[in-house]
Image (cartoon, helix red, strand yellow):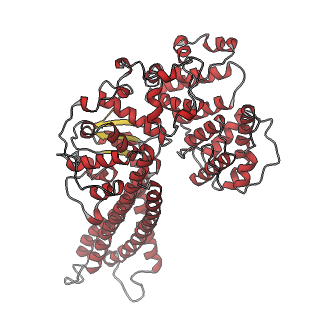
Amino acid sequence: MDFYRHQTKSRRNSRWLITLYLSGVVALGLLSSFMISLMLLPIRWLLKPPDVTHPLFSLGEMGTITLVVMGICLTISALRYQSYKQGGWKIAQRLGGRRVASQPVDFKEQQLRNVIEEMALASNLPVPAVFVQDDERGINAFAAGCGIHDAVLVITQGALDALDRDELQAVMAHELSHIRNGDTRLNTLLASGLSGLLFIAQLANWLNRLGQSATRDYDSNKSPLLQDCVALLGYGGVIFGRLLGAAVNRQREALADASAVQYCRHPEALADALKKVAGHPYASLVFHPASAEFQHLFFAQGLPSTFAGRLATHPPLAERIRLLQPDWDGQYIRTGTRMLQQEYRETADLPVRERTDPDVTAVWRQSPHKQVSLNELDLDAPQEWLPLLPSELQHAVHDDELAGCVIAAHLLSTDLATRHRQLREEPQKEQIENMCCHLLPAKLRLGVLELAVATIQQQPLQQQSALLERVQCFIEADEHISLFEWLLVQWLRHELSPNSSSGISFRHIEESADDLFNILTRLDRAALEQSARHQPLAQRVLTHLSLPVPSATPDKQGWHEHAQSLEKLIRSTPGVKLRILQALSQEMEADGVITDIEFEVFRMLSLCFELPLTAPRSGQATT
């Protein structure tokens, strides 16, 4: 499967459909609102009968009524959107989801968390919260939430029972791609737009009854043609919206399938999962009463009714399988409602305390002073290197008490006097020092930190605040703040205590030149300390963006000023942030060498910007 070509085609089709959808919704809303203003004529007659000197209706009055009705429609859509923005976890709970613990006892739930962590790292996303629908026996899953930080993944118990590890990984990659491509937010916007059109249809029915009552004394034989036209426009608009919404959703499903192949690199696994859906006794059905409202979110069609053709929110299963396996023989995979655990049990998914194979982490224990060569690992395939992590470290990143120790261990100084000051009043001194025994390649430590942060996010806010204070004390102990330490603090603040400030700092890329130059200049200094061959990025990135290079040097600016600059960039429009990351990636790749600090800066900026772009790679210079 050429997933890049399929992604490009799906994105192009989606843009056209979304533009048509928005244009149609606005046009139908204006036309319906205008005709509703005409429907108010009988009510006007009832209040004040027309005469020769007073017109029936002025254009100003009709325009005012049109704007009022359209404003009400937009308000209803906005309120519905706000109700959906309360967080993906509320949708998960509304559909009967149960949150999976960070260290589940059940083997299949442990396996589920493992594959989600692998695919989240492969797609450059924070590890989302996980929910299971215990009462659903069909094979299905969905992602919910309006952003990458409030997104959750929900899977049915039937999918856990029926899918093996590779198939489960492919389905989770599919759902994570919805988060990465912004489909969860897009679906929320489409559903909110339909609410306004539905209001117009209901208002037309109410005015129809009111108008008939008002005109009874004037003309008992009057045909309610105008009212019927408005009602037809209203409900026709809803059908139009659902048709286009379904078309958009089908394109996004095709895009998610292609992206899932990119992340898990196993098209056969996704195809087999779809075959099991078709051959399962409960198929992909979700029987929860609220499932109809969110059926467009599911991995496969979730309603018990048969929706085909233009109203289907998902492409036919056979079509999706054929794209993944062009030589498919047309046969589905028959499964029962449960499978034996021994059929798909794997050592890498066992809880740490149950592992008995001493060779799982042997590659990491060849020498306590030797790191594994990066050439031996594929950083974009976490499923290859996550199982190789020391078992103690895998246990720690998922443990509520030890996850903070993993972060603190990355901040310990190599100077013994400084380390003594850092650990002097630390109650978990021994645990933190134990975490320092595991030497990881520099580009893998961010992945480990992301897993630890995902565990900490499940803790009460008081514990999260305590961790931030603890990290700050560790950094200030040596009276020197490195770029990595500063970035780590900014990232943790963004993840654990999101900024409540509102307003957009920069709407145009030209406005960000000074603050972007401040951040990149600090990166240049840190990169120069790592490699004397480093070519300064600040000027090259600004030139790439056609921005003037500020004449004032930021040499005397401290970390506080840099934090303010970063906050302004974070609160910029998505378009500004996207252009910054794209320019940064291309200029980093231009010299063919990506230093560790460059990789970490790009990765942490993408997390703070909530734009999960793929990190730049060495040797991929653009021409």
- Above/below status of 617 relative to 508: above
For the image shown, how many numbered marks are present on the structure?
0
- The C terminus appears in which quarter of the rendering? bottom right
Front one among 187 and 142: 142
Q: Position of residue 447 (x, y in %)?
A: 52, 33
Among the 4 quarters of the image, the one containing residue 475: top right
> In the rendered image, which quarter is residue 358 located in?
top left
Q: Position of residue 250 (x, y in %)?
A: 35, 59
Query: Left or right: 475 with respect to 36?
Result: right
Q: Position of residue 239 (x, y in %)?
A: 30, 67
Residue 59 in picture, x, y percent from top left: 46, 80
Asked whether residue 454 is in view, the answer is: no
Q: Residue at x 22, y 80 (%)?
A: 217
Horizontal arrangement in the rendering, residue 142 relative to residue 552 (left or right):
left
Q: Is residue 618 above or below residue 315?
A: above
Q: Nearer the viewer, residue 78 or 144?
A: 144
Q: Residue furthest bottom?
A: 52
Q: Can residue 351 be seen from the camera position used here? A: yes
Q: Residue at 24% of width from left, 70% of height from top?
A: 209
| 375 up-or-down from 391: above or below | below
Measured along the vertical axis of the image, is residue 118 above or below residue 243?
A: above
575 to the left or right of 330: right
Could you say which is closer to the camera, residue 622 or residue 408?
622
- Which quarter of the rendering shows the N terminus? bottom left
